[in-house]
Amino acid sequence: MLRTRVITALALLGGFLVTLFLLPDPAAAWIFGVLASVLAWEWAGLMHVDPPGRFLFSGVVMLSCYLVYSEPEFAYWQLWAISGFFWLLVAPLWLWRGWKLSSNDLAGYVTGWILIVPTWAAMVALQDGHPWWLFGVMGLVWVADISAYFVGKTWGKHKLAPAISPGKTWEGAAGAVIGVGIYSVVGAWVADIQLIDKLGWAPLLVALTAMSVAGDLFESMIKRQAGVKDSSRLLPGHGGFLDRLDSQTSMLPLAALILLGTAT
């Protein structure tokens, strides 16, 4: 099982690096769009939508990405603002109240659209001229997940959200913050950034880490309500693409809003 997970992870990383650094921007946007359509197909599956409905929603998301790509200067910022509103205000209330999705529920489709399309826009915008930014931001989530897993497994005692994801602990969440802190220090050193001048970013890094945890918890709740362990079986040893990108859906739009907002 571990070997399968490692092989799949390496294949995904290789494909991501090729897309990020070797392909022209339009081709990368198209590949990210295909990924968005797969995420939509998996999301509709969690709603127990029938196969035609799943492919229809996948097509709607793909078309949305195409239309957004034609008006990026306006649409990207609007999408990230919508995503920020959802994750900062709606998602916490959703987690607290334990709302459930049902098949062909309009709220479910809208939620899936809000999760996926702004994430696609963030990937495209960060990759366009700033591929290392996209790699670095997504790496932040990978480091947070790995740190949370090992710290939680070793020292975890206090459950973070037992009704949603029994395996997550407060110790793991603290490990994620520490791991991200170390990652940012190393990244600043590699990029030759004066860390003293960038300490104001520390609260933002903590906030982004918290957002990634929120995304993970949210998808865990939806999967638990759907009665499934994984969003699909497309990735051997890993489940589905949504399982691997759940934290990115909550964190990437906010990161794009911050990074590209400060760069302009």
Image: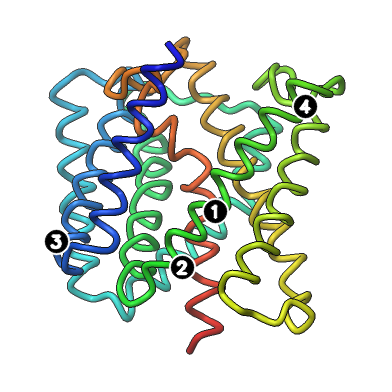
The location of residue 220, given as percent across then percent down, is 55, 25
**Real-space Cα separation, disc 3 to disc 4, in angstroms:** 40 Å
Say which element carries label 4.
strand
Confirm or deny contact between disc 3 and disc 4 (CB under 8 A): no
Mark earlier in primary sequence (4, 1): 4
Residue lying at 60% horizontally and 43% vertically, measured from the top left: 91
Q: Amino acid at mark 1?
A: Met
Viewer-closest of 138 and 11: 11
Residue lying at 77% horizontally and 65% vertically, measured from the top left: 203
Q: Amino acid at mark 3?
A: Ala
- Viewer-nearest of discs 3 and 1: 3
Confirm or deny contact between disc 4 and disc 1 (CB under 8 A): no
Residue 251 marker: 1
The location of residue 106, given as percent across then percent down, is 35, 37
The location of residue 73, given as percent across then percent down, is 32, 81
Q: Amino acid at mark 4?
A: Thr
Residue lying at 51% horizontally and 59% vertically, measured from the top left: 137
**Real-space Cα separation, disc 3 to disc 2, in angstroms:** 18 Å
Residue 27 marker: 3
Q: Quadrant of the rendered structure where residue 35 is?
A: top left
Mark earlier in primary sequence (3, 2): 3
- The residue wearing badge 4 is 169
**Real-space Cα separation, disc 4 to disc 1, in angstroms:** 20 Å
Say which element carries label 1.
helix
- The residue wearing badge 2 is 133
**Real-space Cα separation, disc 2 to disc 4, in angstroms:** 29 Å
Which class describes the residues within 10 Å of circle 4: few (<14), some (14-19), or many (20+)?
many
Q: Amino acid at mark 2?
A: Trp
Q: Which corner quadrant holds the N terminus? A: top left
- Viewer-nearest of discs 2 and 4: 2
Say which element carries label 3.
helix
Mark earlier in primary sequence (3, 1): 3
